[in-house]
Image (cartoon, helix red, strand yellow):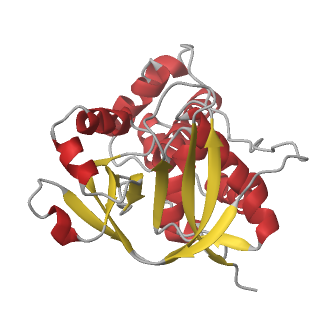
Amino acid sequence: MNDLVEIIRRIEENIDQEIDYNQLCKGLGITSNSLQRIFPVLFNITLSEYIRKRRLTKAAFELKQTQHSVLDIALKYCYETNEAFTTAFKKQHGATPSAVRKGAPFNLFDTLELNLTIKGGKEIPIEIKTLPDFYVAGISIDTFVNSPEISALWERLTNSDLVNDLMSISTGRSFGVCYDIKTNEQIKYMAGWEVESPEKVKHLPVDVTLIKSSTFAIIPCVGEVPESLHNAWAYIWSKFFPESGYTYTGKVDLEYYPEKVTNDNNYQMQIWIPIEKASI
């Protein structure tokens, strides 16, 4: 949690500069890829979008409070041209920079405050297991965290003829696999089932990914998806990591679905978070 507070502080300190995500994480217990993965899960906004909205909020105040030219303000907040700045500004504020300077209203986007505290006194049955290599086969897409494309992917798979063939040769465990973070904050997401080997499914039109041996924290999620997932991630960052002595490796996150997802308030699944002992 302290790492995330520090990251928000560093963003604000450097909001008028190009922000290197590796520098943003320097000296903290989180990597650039991990940060891009968990930021939208916790805050429902990507890291780049958060930075963009904060810059455009700062720019709106500067338009109101100074006589600096629109171009100078655009350059200050990392826009290379007046046109690019005006387009982004109008998208956020609903008015051009010149109109806001003349009195048009604008949309303030506040700095994030981390109020993710979960009240104590609960017994949460967390398992920590080191698992061997295993394979997951299914269909995958390049998408973004929290994208509705993920639900659509599962629906496409479960409504296809492929699902019965895949389930019949699987070990019976169904996973959503989030991996391969891209520099543009895209992720690769797979909906599929565990299989013994790629050879078992080579006759099927599926992707296969190897989940390499790792230590996982297995966190129960109870309730409607995706709200239960968000609550679990909030717990992980506000309670588990600060108290456990583990850090997040961000290699691959797994959603384990023991049965078909429903909107039942008591629906139970798990997220498997790759962890390692924090360096001292």
Is residue 249 visible in the rendered image? The answer is: yes
x, y percentage for residue 255? 48, 51
Residue under the image location 12 percent in, 55 percent down: 204
Q: Please give left or right for residue 123 compared with residue 30 in the image.
A: right
Q: Position of residue 47 (x, y in %)?
A: 51, 49
Q: Is residue 77 left or right of residue 82?
A: right
- Determine the image quadrant of residue 112: top right
Q: Quadrant of the C terminus?
A: bottom right
- Looking at the image, residue 71 lies above or below residue 205: above
Q: Residue furthest right?
A: 121
Query: From this viewpoint, which residue is outermost toward the left?
Result: 203
How many callouts does the rendering have?
0
Residue situated furthest front in the rendering? 168
Image position, residue 1 (x, y; %):
74, 57
Looking at the picture, tell me which residue is in the foreground, 155 or 77.
155
Query: Residue 241's x, y, as percent?
Result: 73, 64
Looking at the image, which residue is at 23% across and 43% down? Answer: 163
Q: Is residue 17 visible?
A: no
User: Is residue 196 left or right of 144 when viewed as pictured?
Assistant: left
- Image quadrant where residue 160 sits: top left
Q: Is residue 73 above or below residue 170?
A: above
Question: Which residue is nearer to you in this view: 118 or 166?
Answer: 166
Q: Residue furthest bottom?
A: 280
Task: Identify which residue is drawn at 16% across, 71% down.
Answer: 199
